[in-house]
């Protein structure tokens, strides 16, 4: 660990040929989300949303986005109000809303502004726009967004509904603010609470505000998990009537296990076992085989997969196979994706031939068979309908083989429910990093090699670079065994970034014209590199820019034995 002050950095130029402005100007318009990706378990009656905000600087709030569910569907069916508009009042109370859930709208609540909600059909986001932005001073605040009935649209005056999650709220932060404790009230100012809302805030910060921003991506980014998202369509996804073969490739050196996926030749074969649905489910969020799991099943062999091995699986009614014993009645584990990759990423590891809201309690069958050799097991969803849709149905089959091979065969695959995004792929689970979605059919046609779990180091700052304070520059996501690295510091951004393949780091890029290079040693408690950055209380530093990049010494990935983080551009200010 090294501590250094910005006075130690000389204000010098560089002979590098290409530079970009970087982050010398004011921060761009900001967007904050209380969830990394909007998620949904249920729809709730909506009268107000309450939450706390701790603002590091004054915030100028221009509007919000959320997910409404007022489109003439559901169970029970809600009135169609798509296109309708209605008022939304923004109330504030100092410190926190806690203890004042039923005291408004009178004092100590303060009405700061009124916006207009326009209802869009899920999965589109509904916008709340303030014609006069709401200014929230720096400090701690409780907030209540109070929704009035619609005044325009197909069914004005009807009750409103929003989509949310049943999980308890977790504080979420960006460099300017923290949101916590959010919940939904079905009747305003009653103190009763429902689920947690999906909220996105569009806001601006003062032009003098200190800020930081990442530049590019480090090397190497090859996550083991992969997936494709499928929007609903009457025609069905392009997976149907195809097959694929996953060839397990074991770890080698610094590289983890992965799959070579090629087109398969197998077709769905009839099961010889009774349907699992004739017996009792193991877990269920509905008390039926809808949104349910089988009891954990012990395999007749140890199954190796990219990132682990198991001799237990648990079969999900919604088109996935958990690669461990899972006993959990929660909707996040038993349910489908519903427009989000979060459950797929954060639940236990699983293979999903097609994760969608299937309902074997309404029809079709679900099977587990053991091959006579004892070296393979076959899982089959046979003519299973989507929830609330009698036809068409879904038929698909997964074979897991001793040695880690996976065969997936599809018959007809149904996905017609709007908003219930289908997912096909593999996740190591428990929040393990996923890349962007891919087009599986196009990749598999040419032969698709998945990632080997190489994940690049990530460089960030613990807090904004405010003049007169100290912040930590942190390199996380280090490959296990990494103990030493370098931290480069400069004042200009190289753009486009410089390809480092010529020095033995193919696929890595340089983002700064560094003129100081510090050694870094791993912090034994956090497992990160931590460099305190002391910023003197000197007004001359306002708007000065500094650019950092970390380079851990990590062997096995290239001939130089170095990997690189993203760049980090910091603009000093208040």
Image: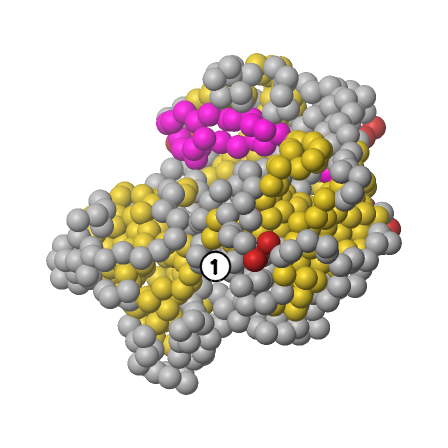
Local packing at callout 1 (Cα closer than 10 Å; few below 14, some 14-19, many 20+) is some
- Residue 159 locus on image (x, y percent): 32, 75
Residue 451 drawn in magenta: yes
- Residue 392 locus on image (x, y percent): 66, 73
Q: Extreme bottom residue here?
A: 154
Inspect this view and state whether residue 336 appears.
no
Task: Give whichever of 305, 557 is nearer the camera.
Answer: 305
Q: How many labels does the image show?
A: 1
Question: Compared with residue 452, is residue 282 higher up or lower down, i.e. above or below?
Answer: below
Question: Compared with residue 507, is residue 418 higher up or lower down, i.e. above or below?
Answer: below
Residue 276 drawn in magenta: no
Task: Give whichever of 196, 272 is nearer the camera.
Answer: 272
Inspect this view and state whether residue 357 appears.
yes
What residue do we see at 53% from left, 63% from top? 361
- Residue 326 locus on image (x, y percent): 53, 41
Task: Give whichever of 433, 216 is nearer the camera.
Answer: 433
What residue do we see at 71% from left, 33% from top? 301
What's drawn in magenta, residue-wise? 448-477
Q: Extreme left residue here?
A: 107
What residue do we see at 17% from left, 58% from top? 102
Which residue bears the numbered disc 1?
288
What residue do we see at 57% from left, 34% from top? 568
Question: Compared with residue 347, is residue 562 higher up or lower down, i.e. above or below?
Answer: above
Colour theme = secondary structure
Identify the image quadrant of residue 232.
bottom right
Label 1 sits on a secondary structure element that is loop
Q: In which quarter of the image is the C terminus?
A: top left
- Residue 529 locus on image (x, y percent): 54, 21
């Amino acid at each position: 660990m090294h501590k250094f002050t910005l006075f130690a950095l000389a204000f010098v130029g560089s002979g590098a040929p290409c530079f970009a402005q970087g982050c010398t100007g004011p921060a761009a318009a900001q967007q904050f989300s209380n969830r990394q990706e909007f998620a949904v378990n249920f729809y709730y009656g909506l009268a107000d949303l309450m939450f706390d905000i701790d603002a590091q600087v004054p915030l100028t709030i221009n509007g919000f986005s959320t997910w409404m569910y007022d489109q003439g569907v559901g169970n029970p069916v809600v009135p169609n109000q798509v296109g309708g508009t209605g008022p939304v009042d923004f109330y504030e109370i100092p410190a926190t809303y806690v203890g004042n859930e039923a005291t408004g709208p009178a004092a100590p609540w303060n009405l700061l502004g009124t916006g207009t909600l326009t209802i869009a059909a899920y999965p589109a986001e509904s916008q709340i726009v303030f014609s006069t932005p709401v200014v929230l001073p720096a400090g701690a605040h409780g907030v209540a967004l109070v929704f009035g009935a619609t005044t325009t649209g197909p069914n004005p005056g009807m009750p409103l509904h929003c989509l949310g999650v049943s999980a308890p709220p977790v504080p979420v932060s960006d460099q300017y603010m923290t949101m916590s404790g959010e919940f939904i009230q079905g009747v305003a100012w009653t103190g009763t609470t429902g689920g947690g809302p999906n909220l996105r805030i569009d806001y601006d910060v003062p032009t003098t505000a200190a800020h930081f921003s990442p530049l590019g991506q480090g090397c190497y980014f090859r996550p083991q998990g992969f997936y494709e998202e499928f929007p609903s369509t009457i025609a069905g996804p392009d997976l149907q009537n195809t097959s694929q073969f996953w060839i397990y490739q074991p770890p080698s050196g610094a590289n983890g296990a992965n799959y070579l996926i090629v087109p398969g030749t197998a077709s769905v074969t009839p099961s010889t076992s009774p349907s699992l649905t004739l017996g009792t489910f193991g877990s269920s969020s509905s008390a039926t085989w809808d949104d349910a799991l089988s009891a954990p099943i012990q395999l007749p062999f140890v199954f190796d997969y990219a990132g682990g091995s198991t001799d237990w699986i648990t079969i999900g009614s919604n088109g996935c196979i958990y690669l461990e014993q899972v006993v959990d009645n929660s909707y996040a584990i038993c349910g489908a994706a519903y427009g989000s990759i979060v459950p797929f990423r954060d639940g236990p590891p699983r293979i999903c031939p097609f994760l969608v809201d299937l309902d074997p309690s309404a029809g079709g069958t679900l099977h587990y068979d053991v091959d006579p050799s004892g070296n393979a097991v076959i899982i089959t969803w046979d003519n299973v309908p989507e929830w609330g849709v009698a036809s068409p149905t879904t038929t698909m089959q997964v074979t897991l083989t001793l040695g880690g091979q996976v065969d997936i065969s599809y018959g007809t695959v149904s996905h017609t429910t709007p908003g219930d995004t289908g997912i096909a792929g593999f996740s190591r689970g428990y929040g393990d990093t996923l890349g962007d979605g891919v087009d599986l059919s196009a990749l598999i046609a040419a032969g698709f090699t998945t990632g080997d779990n190489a994940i690049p180091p990530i460089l960030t700052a613990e807090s904004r670079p405010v003049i007169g304070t100290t912040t930590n520059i942190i390199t996380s996501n280090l490959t296990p065994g990494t103990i030493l690295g370098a931290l480069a510091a400069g004042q200009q951004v190289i753009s486009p970034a410089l390809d480092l393949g010529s020095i033995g780091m193919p696929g890595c890029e340089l983002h700064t014209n560094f003129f100081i290079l510090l050694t870094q040693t791993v912090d034994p408690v956090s497992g990160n590199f931590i460099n305190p950055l002391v910023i003197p209380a000197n007004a001359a530093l306002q708007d000065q820019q500094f650019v950092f990049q970390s380079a851990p010494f990590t062997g096995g990935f290239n001939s130089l034995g170095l990997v690189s983080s993203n760049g980090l551009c910091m603009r000093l200010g208040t």
